[in-house]
Image (tube, rainbow, N blue to C red):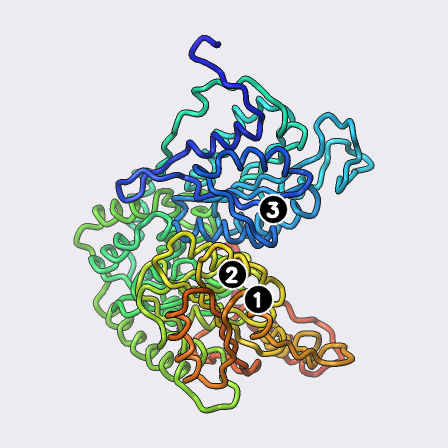
Amino acid sequence: MNATGGTVRLTMAQALVRYLAAQTTVIDGEETPLFGGVWAIFGHGNVAGMGEALWHARDRLPTYRAHNEQAMAHAAIAYAKASRRRRMMACTSSIGPGATNMVTAAALAHVNRLPVLLLPGDVFASRRPDPVLQQVEDFGDGTVSANDCFRPVSAYFDRITRPEQILTALPRALSVLTDPAACGPVTLALCQDVQAEAFDYPERFFEPREWTPRRPSPDMRELDLAAGLLTDAKTPLIVAGGGVHYAEATATLRAFAERHGVPVAETQAGKSALPHDHPLNLGSVGVTGSSAANAMAEKADLVLAVGTRLQDFTTGSWSLFGHPDRRIVALNVQPFDAGKRHAQPLVADAGVGLEMLSAVLADWRAPAAWTEKAASEIKGWTRAVTAATAATNAALPSDAQVIGAVQRASLPDDVVVCAAGGLPGELHKLWRAERPGGYHLEYGYSCMGYEIAGGLGVKMADPSREVIVMVGDGSYLMMNSEIATSILLDRKLIIVLLDNRGFGCINRLQRATGGESFNNLLEHTLHEALPEVDFRAHAESLGARAEKVSSLADLEASIGRARDAEKTSVIVIDTDPMPTTEAGGHWWDVAVPEVSDRAEVRAARKDYDQALTRQRLGD
């Protein structure tokens, strides 16, 4: 017994699992577990300790088996994103390759500011059996293990070398995972002998604790300065980022834009913050932006950046916002992001910040001529989207035309999921999102292989919504294993696989920078024979129902059949790797060689040097 209550003797792993199971949150007025479960692939580094502990807690904290450690972490991250960071998952692996497989996912979560708890096994704290199987030995540092790879891509990192250390490590971990500013991946490396060691833990450590999101208000001086910049603006523009969704502020953003007549452009993470047909929604902004948003961004004298880290795709590598007197007000819960590019910071929750800023602005509205210009630009862009996504009888449709077919077969509550390659750019421009959360793109890290695993995480977060995964053949071949997991867990996905026989997006970029097609499309790689991959048969071998379609009309009909099916469907369609939507878009800084024997490269370098003059450095 201790002075303030009893103790319970548990292994470190048992105590960790019991603690996680006791954490809760409140969503829509109802208390719910904070953790949606634990993804686990067991090996010698975690099966005895964590495996036994998770078995005992399986009714309170479900354990899900995956087929790839990186993929299971992607699914956990997508679950948190689809849950607007209100709920999350943990992932446990063995030491060695099981752990390092999750490093890429940790980087993805870190870039996208998303919570996931990573619990890789580690070496023996006692060092008695060193070097153990899969142990990475550093010739100059006896404290290093493979898990040190997680340090630069974790928002919080700890190595548990004694069982009592979790008494401080777990509360710290949860504080980071649930903090809107510090949010990101947490790694607790669990020495495998310590997982099995027992300790007398205070019973109060396992009392339920409720975690609700902090909603910080802005500093009043920053609020007044931001309001002053807005009231002086003649051509203001809102750029809505992912923070709008995580703050559950989509309705607040809409009310702010409507009250003050300020048009809104959306980042990849911010898309679906407003319905696509809202009269103030200019659509996507930046490199993959609409002509409407980019035309307005070029003339904006005040950019109100809400919940965005202003990545280069958003800013056209800082050449998009061209007004000579342009100012930025950065409303962000994270001071690091709010202070970028000499912005006037407004450090606050997106919803609270918009509400208080609106109150200070009172009846101020953007000039009517500016709002009317937005309406005119939106009409022009709507026509361009309709043309780009129209059905065609071409033998091989473009990505845009496939997107149009998928859109026509979709319902308002469906969620489209995608990640790297050419599809995110086309989707950002062309997809017409009707509901918040209906557009789920991982484009902060642009990680190939996220798509199917991410779709699974989205479906687990909200089984009521149909999840449509759009993926290219390149990403599919990198990571498709979680098709089998979706069957295992009875979480149905509709997967539309676009086969352009290689990495079409990077081939186009290669050509645009003066290069010859090389090592991207399969036909332009070193080969003895070109593979004829039967994606339909492959998907069926993983347990899915699958079809290959030959036209856009067949694709739309196939999506209808997939919607009626009871398990995951994969629909394969061949596409043309060369076309891309020419409407909209903006320059992106991809360095072109200064010296080359190719005239095409020299011409591309000349254009590149000219484009560099439009970049705004230091502001």
- Observer-side mark, 2 or 3, equals 3
| Disc 1 packing (10 Å; few <14; some 14–19; many ≥20) | some
**Is residue 92 visible to the viewer in this orientation of the structure?**
yes
Question: Which residue is under mark 1?
Answer: 589
Relative to 560, is 127 above or below?
above
Q: Which mark is residue 303?
A: none
Question: Which residue is under mark 2?
Answer: 312
Residue 589's spot in the image, x, y percent? 57, 66
| Disc 3 packing (10 Å; few <14; some 14–19; many ≥20) | many
Residue 191's spot in the image, x, y percent? 66, 32
The amino acid type, in three-letter code, at marker 1 is Asp
* Left or right: 470, with 13 as reference point: left
Callout 2–callout 1 Cβ contact below 8 Å: yes
| Disc 2 packing (10 Å; few <14; some 14–19; many ≥20) | some
Question: Which residue is under mark 3?
Answer: 41
Q: Looking at this view, is 339 or 413 the one in front? A: 413
Distance from Cα at disc 1 to Cα at disc 3: 40 Å
- Observer-side mark, 1 or 3, equals 3
Residue located farthest toward the left when viewing the structure as drawn: 363
**Quadrant of the rendered structure where residue 132 is?**
top right
Distance from Cα at disc 2 to Cα at disc 3: 36 Å
